[in-house]
Image (cartoon, rainbow, N blue to C red):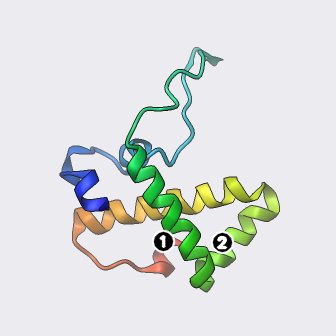
Amino acid sequence: MIVLESGDINRFAKVGNYASYCRCVGSKRISNGKSKGHGNAKNGNKYLAWAYMEAANFAVRYNPHIKRYYQRKKAKTNGIIAIKAVAHKLARACYYVLRDDVPFDVHKAFA
């Protein structure tokens, strides 16, 4: 599903552009150091946002390395922000897996 919804991965110049398209980053509109509203919160692909959040919840339950990362984040913030951080890491890792055609390495993604 992620490959179908993402389309051609080469259309994203940087990994941050892909993560933003997947709604895995906070939506900010800042100009000259001032917040300019919150009108861009729904930009991106809602299905990819859902898929990465589901993958993050599953990964936290079944992968000890990702669970450790989640618990570190949760100790500093709350659980929702920590899961969103895991989803962001997974989106970044997926970008490199799709672009470079390499297998997923949990140690590299969650070091």
The crowd level at tag 1 (other Cα within 10 Å; few <14, some 14-19, many 20+) is some
Q: How many residues crowd around disc 2 within 10 Å: few (fewer than 14), some, or many (20 or more)? A: some
The x, y position of residue 18, in whole percent, is 36, 48
Marks 1 and 2 in Cβ contact (< 8 Å): no
Residue in the image at 58% along x and 68% along y: 57
Q: Which residue is mark 1?
A: 109
Residue drawn at x 68%, y 59% is 82
Q: Is residue 49 rendered to the left or right of residue 102?
A: right
Tell me the number on the disc at residue 36.
Answer: none
* Separation of marks 1 and 2 at Cα, in angstroms: 10 Å
The quarter of the picture where residue 26 lies is top right
Q: Is residue 3 above or below residue 101?
A: above
Asked whether residue 105 is in view, the answer is yes
Q: Is residue 95 left or right of residue 4?
A: right
From where the camera sits, is residue 111 visible?
A: no
Q: Earlier in the sequence, mark 1 or mark 2?
A: 2
Amino acid on which disc 2 is placed: Tyr
Lateral position of residue 34 relative to residue 106, left or right:
right
Q: Which mark is residue 69?
A: 2
Q: What residue is rendered at 58% in x and 84% in y?
A: 62
Q: Quadrant of residue 64?
A: bottom right
Which residue type does callout 1 highlight?
A: Ala
Which residue of the protein is positioned furthest toward the right in this rendering? 75
Per the image, label 2 sits on a secondary structure element best described as helix
- How far across and down, in percent of the image, does residue 89 sit? 50, 62
Q: Could you say whether the residue bearing mark 1 is in a helix, strand or loop?
A: helix
The total number of labels drawn is 2
Q: Position of residue 90 (x, y in %)?
A: 46, 64
Residue 87 locus on image (x, y percent): 52, 60
